[in-house]
Image (spheres, rainbow, N blue to C red):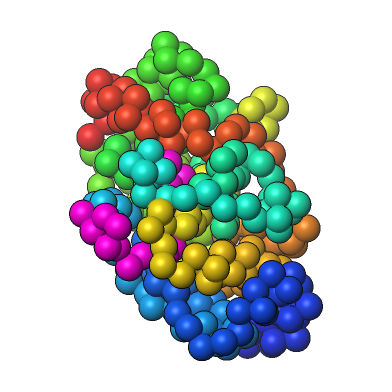
Amino acid sequence: MKKQVFAFFRMTTLIAGTALWTSLSFANEVNVYSERKEELIRPLLDQFTKDTGIHVNLITGKADALIVRMANEGKFSPADVLITTDVGRLVRAKNQGLTQAFESVLARQKVSPYYQDPEGHWYGLSLRARPLMYAIERVKPETLNDLEDLGSPQWKGKVCVRSSSNIYNQSMVAALLYQLEEKRTADLVKALVNNFARPPMGGDRDQIKAVAAGECDIAIANTYYLAGMLAGNNLKETAAAKKVKVFWPNQNNRGAHVNISGAAIAKYAKNKQHAEALLNFLLSKPAQSWYSETNFEYSVRTDIESSKLLKSFGEFKAEHIPMEKVGELNTNAVKLMDRAGWK
C-alpha cells in the first residue's frame, strides 16, 4: 500500500496544488518541531524535500516540552513549524504568542472552517475520531446509543478509558463543555467515572486489549489505534482487535467526538516561505491520501476518500464545533475531570 501511495505522490504532487510551493525549489531548509513520531511524519517530509529541494530538519518530542522550548528560545528559536496531535496544544501555543498567522488559500478552499484557526494561526492536517469500541461477543450494538449512556447502571464496572492527563480525553470533555454546558457535562463525567472497570491505565491500545480480554465491555479510543492493530504485524494485537467493533455515538444529535492533528508557523520563523510551502504540501491531495492509507486518520478535506480499512468502521456524523473552543476550554475540562475523580 505504501508503495502505491508514494507512486501516487510521484505522479500527482506536481499537479495537485504544487504551484503553491514549486517556486521554492532551490536548496534551503525548514525546521520542524513535531509531536508526531518520526515514522509517522518523516516519509511525507522526505517527499516534500524530493519535490522542492527544501531540506527538513526534524525535532520530535512531547508537545508541551516543545512549546516550553519555543518559549524559552524566544526570538532565537530555530523553529519554523510546530506540529501537534491535538488542537489544545495549538491553541496553547497561539495564546502564548508563539505562532503567527498566514493565509492558506488551499486550506480556506478545501478544509472546513471548523478545523482551522479563524485568524490563520494553525490549520488541521488530519481528523481523529474518538468513538466507542465494544466487545463483539458480549455487547449488542442496539444497546448502545450516546456517549452519555455510558453513565447508566447497565455499564457499571464495564467501561475502560485512559487517564485524565491524556489530551485526547481532555479535549473530549472540553467539547462536551462547549456543547452541553458545565452542569450536564459534570454529571455525565461523574457517572462515567463511576462505571470505570478499573483505574485508568495505559494508552488507547491498552483499552482495546482490555475489552478483548474481558476486563471491560466498552472502551473509548481513537480509531487509528484500532486500525493500526488490525493492519500491524503483531499477531496478538491483531487478534485482540478482531474481538472489538466500532460504535459511533450521538448520531441522532451532535455527532461523534473528533479532534485534529495540526500545524502552525512559529512566530520567529526564519524560513517562513518554506514553512508555508510545507503546510500547503501537507494539505495537498497526495499528503492527505497518505494520512488515510498509512496513518489511518481521516482527511480534513472533504474531497479525499478514506482508506478501505477506515471505511470498514462505517460512515459517521462528526461533531461540528469550532476547534479553537476545544482548546480554550481545556483548563476547565481538566478541573472538571479532577472534581469527578477521573484519575
Q: How many numbered marks are there?
A: 0
Residue at 59% x, 39% y is 118
| Residue 283 as seen in the image, left or right of residue 57 | right
Residue at 69% x, 87% y is 10
* 89 over 310 or under it: above or below: above
Residue 320 on the magenta segment = no
Report which quarter residue 82 is drawn in.
bottom left
Residue at 74% x, 62% y is 305
Residue 37: x percent and y percent?
A: 38, 69
Q: Which residues are magenta?
A: 72-91
Q: Is residue 191 visible?
A: no
| Residue 272 as seen in the image, left or right of residue 201 | right
* 296 over 340 or under it: above or below: below
Residue 61: x percent and y percent?
A: 29, 64
Q: Quadrant of the C terminus?
A: top left
Residue 73 on the magenta segment = yes
| Residue 124 as seen in the image, left or right of residue 284 | left
Residue placed most toward the observer, 203 or 123: 123
Residue placed most toward the observer, 72 or 305: 72
Residue at 52% x, 49% y is 101
Q: Is residue 24 visible?
A: yes
